[in-house]
Amino acid sequence: MGALSGGSVIAILLVGALAGWLAGKLVEGSGFGLIGNIAIGIVGAFLARLILPAVGLGLAGGFFSAVIQATFGAVILLWLARLVRKA
């Protein structure tokens, strides 16, 4: 139950990579490379899972919904990173 199967790990990496890449395109000056994009996408997915329900937003399940949610979280994460870099 608690262990991730090989397929789910690949799905998480795929969603993270795609979301991180999309967020990198949406937020200027955020070149973190492939590994950085995957990490930002995965962290962004967790961030979105905390933020979206708190503001009353929820998306259906599925791959595309996961990418949209993770991208939203990754954009917020990149935006916060840019604020910290400027400070």
Image (cartoon, helix red, strand yellow):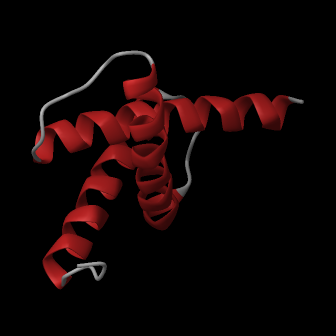
28 lies left or right of 22 = right
Q: Nearer the viewer, residue 40 or 29?
A: 40
Q: Nearer the viewer, residue 82 or 13?
A: 13
Residue, far front: 1
Q: Is residue 53 above or below residue 13?
A: above
Q: Is residue 36 something one can see in this rendering? A: yes
Q: Which of 28 and 46 is in front in this view?
A: 46
Tell me where residue 23 appears, x and y as whole percent.
42, 36
Q: Is residue 13 above or below residue 29?
A: below
Residue, far right: 87
Q: Which residue corresponds to the image point at 41% horizontal and 60% vertical from the top-left?
A: 38
Q: Which residue corresponds to the image point at 14% horizontal and 76% vertical from the top-left?
A: 7
45 lies left or right of 75 = left
To which quarter of the image does residue 60 belong? Answer: top left
Q: Which residue corresponds to the image point at 19% horizontal and 83% vertical from the top-left?
A: 6
Q: Is residue 29 something one can see in this rendering? A: no
Q: In this view, does 42 lie above or below 62?
A: below
Q: Which residue corresponds to the image point at 25% horizontal and 25% vertical from the top-left?
A: 58
**Quarter the N terminus occupies:** bottom left
**Quarter the C terminus occupies:** top right
Residue, far top: 56
Tell me where residue 48 appears, x and y as whole percent.
42, 36
To which quarter of the image does residue 54 belong? Answer: top left
Q: Nearer the viewer, residue 38 or 4?
A: 4
Tell me where residue 47 appears, x and y as whole percent.
49, 41
Tell me where residue 80 appears, x and y as whole percent.
67, 32
41 lies left or right of 17 = right
Count numbered badges in the picture.
0
